[in-house]
Amino acid sequence: MPDFRRTLERAFRRRIVVKDTADAVVASGTSAQLDEIGGGEVAAGLGAGTVAIMLAGVAAFLNLYATQPLLPMFAQIFAASKAAVGMTVSASSIGVALSAPFCGLIAERIGRKRVIVMATLLLAVPTLLASTSTSLSMLIFWRFLQGVVMPGIFGVAIAYIAEEWPPGNMARTMSLYVSATVLGGFLGRVIVGYAATHRIFGSIAPSWRLGFVIVGGCDLLFGLAIARWLPRDRKLVAAPVQLGAGVLRHLRNPRLLATYAVGFNVLFSLVAIFTYITFHLAAPPYSLTPAQLSSLFVVYLAGLIVTPLAGIGIGHFGSRPVLIAAVIGSMAGVAITLLHSMPLILVGLVLCSSGVFVCQSASTSYIQMASPPGGRASAAGLYVACYYAGGSVAGVLPGYFWRFGGWTACVVLVLVVQVVTITVAAIGWRDS
């Protein structure tokens, strides 16, 4: 009997310690501390899992927009128009948009971790092959295949976070993940742009091809690290899900429809600005080189600070007011890029990109609330499809506006799209 009493007392004390520690973790948003409190197989590896899920974001976005600083160079090398070389950006976005819904459904059947790991390793193949391209059409083809693989990483990672992280910690973890995608996007552009004009290895001449080789090698290394550190899924949907039924269910949800429209517009704005400003700044009086153009994307690093703060703001105020405020800030930044001052243009790009990253955090957090349990991966997959459909259109459509009004016409187009974004979110996003 005394032994039994002592056992109960120890259990009670342990319960108090675990509860206090868990409350502190939720309050601080530090997922690594979950290692100390137990809570299942995934919770036990959540610290390493946070690093792994961030590596997944870096790996995918190393590739997605890597050609942006090279567009003026490609226009000369391949003797092509701005819209034609812009297809090296759009092709990967088109691939993402086409494959994203399928990746979400596959993940719900065979497991999210398995899909993330396979996609990261497989991404290295078209990335390395892109370095062998001898024509613009061949480069566009490999870029398209890169895009086909990418949703298996970032589309599924969104659902993985929603299902495997504690609800009180999800928004902040999502913001950390978005920060990692920001870092990946920055590094991908810098690696490729710098390799195109600077000698990275003493015996190898500068070449845009070398940049793709380096990025492909990073994909392989990150894939192995993710396989090692990312915890196995706790939850799997065993019942088969039909693509048509799943898509129709999500498309009948007004809140999801509004979120898909917001996603389309958000990425359209970012890709349009950062694709066509390279032509604006490569021309006189700026005349920037590919390496200098790639260094512009250092403004993305502001997102490493802004997006975690956005997670806190979303938790306190909700997704809709945070998104609307972010779009207004982004619009101010877009307008500032019309000024003929390089420092002010950089300030404008910081505001524009930071606003878009906050919008992405708000959208990815909101979609988990608006989608039904058990269908979050497919809902996120459809969101990714719409999001990158916006990026696909943005790689080409502003090129036609450029013909009529240059950079000013592109800016006006983006501002109109951002006004539509605010309207859709204000009307279509409602709390649960």
Image: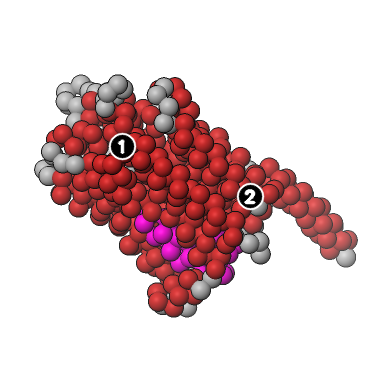
Magenta-colored span: 366-389
> Could you tell me if residue 402 is visible in this image?
yes
Q: Is residue 93 visible?
A: no
Amino acid type, residue under disc 1 in the picture: Gly
Q: Residue at x 50, y 52 (%)?
A: 421
Pinpoint residue 18: horizontal percent, then vertical percent: 74, 52
Which residue is more in the foreground, 163 or 193? 193
Picture coordinates of residue 207, whole percent (x, y): 19, 31
Label 1 belongs to which residue?
A: 406
Looking at the picture, how far across and down is residue 67, in whole percent? Answer: 28, 40
Q: From what the image shows, is residue 383 above or below residue 193?
A: below
Q: Main secondary structure of the magenta part?
A: helix
- Packing grade of label 1 (10 A; few <14, some 14-19, many >=20) is some
Q: On the image, which quarter does residue 190 sit in?
A: top left
Which residue is found at the position 26% from the left and 27% from the top?
283
Q: Residue 167 or 345: which is nearer the viewer?
A: 345
Q: Are marks 1 and 2 in contact (CB under 8 Å)?
A: no
In magenta stretch: residue 385? yes
Q: According to the image, label 2 marks what residue?
A: 321
Residue displayed at 30% across by 56% down = 94
> Which residue is located at x 60 percent, y 44 percent?
325
Drawn side of residue 126 relative to residue 16, left or right: left
**In the figure, 187 relative to 20: above or below?**
above
